[in-house]
């Protein structure tokens, strides 16, 4: 096993830094890692398993699809360690009632009641339908699901989600699979400031530096899929993402210094040099 | 008799039930969920769920997703 995979992430949390992080709490669960991983688009399942192990992520998204009647497809659950929480995506749903139907099917699998509401009826941009997402969230929260809705960052939509019992908010950074980073940065900041629920930035995070950026802003977690699954070395970039997420979190907790418009020297003034030049 | 499974019309035995259908098309260790005519049927009831002509069955399982 490559050496970079053998250092447990937990070491860095327990090291001597003065800032300690609290665990991420969503509903009734605590997570020690604020990096979430999506399981779609991996070229092969072993890449997926290596990425989960390398990043030490504690929560992954999966989807539900019709079984292929002609051949026995691989069972993805065999590649996901048992202690990892499954967040079942309602992808495929075009409206609230389809999302609700998928969630109820997911519950029947016995794999938990954590659901990511993804309602998309636009195939060009894959933008979520906030309105239908709120409707689905309200129904499913009442049925006892732990609901994490994927939305466009909108303050009013987020406030509604709080009201209807959402367990968090997952605002998109940019379009799914685009790797464009935090195009919606300023809107996400507003949610972080105003919404009293875990904010998990999801979609469009294309580089570990962008995950760090989201965490520096005060996001509670990030979810990445495409950038890991389609990388040349998925497990290596998964570890990079996990480290970057943690770095961004520590930066946020340490209180980032403000930007200055003018320079401010880091070294004291050299008064003795100026005295020499005056005398000549 | 003809029934629809995951959108495909299939010819099945008159005396079949949901359990037999799932055994035929799915690996035993896979977590699947089944709907008959839009209603989820719990796995405990599969063996007791006879199928009739024209029934529409959905069998779904987990796949990778974002």
Image (tube, rainbow, N blue to C red):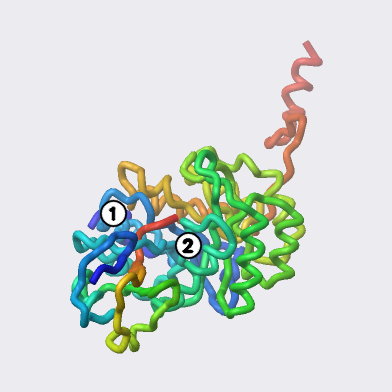
- Choose between A92 and B3: the one closer to the eye: B3
Residue under label 1, please give it.
A47
Q: Is residue A278 left or right of residue A71?
A: right
B10 or A249, which is in the foreground? B10
Report whether A23 appears left or right of B32: right
Residue A145 lies in what quarter of the image?
Answer: bottom right
Quarter of the image that includes the N terminus of chain A: bottom left
Q: Position of residue A44 (x, y in %)?
A: 26, 53
Q: Relative to A276, say whether A261 is above or below.
A: below
Mark sitting on residue A89 = 2
Gap in angstroms between the C-alphas marked 1 and 2: 20 Å
Out of A67 and A196, give the one closest to the viewer: A67
Q: Nearer the viewer, mark 1 or mark 2?
A: 2
**Who comes first in sequence, dot 1 or dot 2?**
1
Q: Residue at x 44, y 72 (%)?
A: B38
Q: Residue furthest right?
A: A278
Circle 1 SS class = helix
What residue is shown at x 38% (from left), y 64% (from top)? A8
Chain for numbered disc 1: A
- Residue at 58%, 54% in the rendered image: A201
Report x, y in % for residue B17: 26, 81
């Amino acid at each position: 096993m490559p050496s970079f995979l053998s250092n447990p992430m937990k070491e860095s949390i327990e090291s001597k830094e003065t800032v300690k992080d609290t665990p991420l709490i969503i509903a009734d669960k605590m997570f020690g890692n604020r990096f979430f991983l999506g399981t779609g688009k991996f070229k092969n399942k072993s890449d997926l398993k290596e990425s989960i192990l390398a990043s030490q992520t504690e929560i992954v998204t999966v989807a539900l699809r019709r079984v292929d009647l002609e051949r026995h497809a691989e069972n993805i659950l065999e590649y996901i360690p048992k202690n990892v929480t499954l967040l079942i995506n309602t992808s495929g749903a075009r409206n609230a009632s389809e999302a609700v139907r998928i969630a109820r099917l997911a519950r029947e699998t016995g794999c938990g009641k954590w659901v990511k509401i993804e309602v998309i009826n636009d195939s060009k941009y894959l933008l979520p339908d906030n309105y239908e997402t709120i409707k689905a969230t309200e129904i499913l929260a009442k049925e006892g699901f732990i609901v994490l809705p994927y939305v466009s960052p909108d303050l009013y939509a987020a406030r509604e989600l709080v009201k209807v019992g959402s367990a968090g908010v997952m605002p998109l950074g940019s379009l799914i699979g685009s790797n464009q980073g935090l195009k919606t940065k300023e809107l996400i900041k507003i949610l972080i400031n105003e919404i009293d629920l875990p904010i998990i930035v999801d979609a469009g995070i294309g580089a570990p530096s962008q995950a760090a950026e989201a965490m520096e802003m005060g996001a509670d977690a990030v979810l990445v899929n495409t950038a890991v699954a389609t990388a040349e070395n998925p497990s290596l970039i998964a570890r990079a993402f996990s480290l970057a997420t943690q770095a961004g979190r520590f930066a946020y907790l340490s209180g980032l210094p403000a930007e200055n418009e003018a320079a401010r020297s880091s070294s004291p003034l050299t008064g003795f040099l100026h005295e020499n030049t005056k005398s000549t | 008799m003809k029934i629809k499974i995951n959108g495909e019309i299939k010819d099945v035995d008159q005396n079949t039930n949901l359990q037999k259908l799932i055994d035929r098309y799915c690996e035993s260790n896979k977590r699947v969920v089944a709907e008959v005519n839009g209603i989820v049927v719990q796995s405990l009831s599969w063996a007791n769920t006879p199928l009739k002509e024209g029934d529409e069955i959905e069998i779904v399982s987990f796949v990778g997703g974002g």
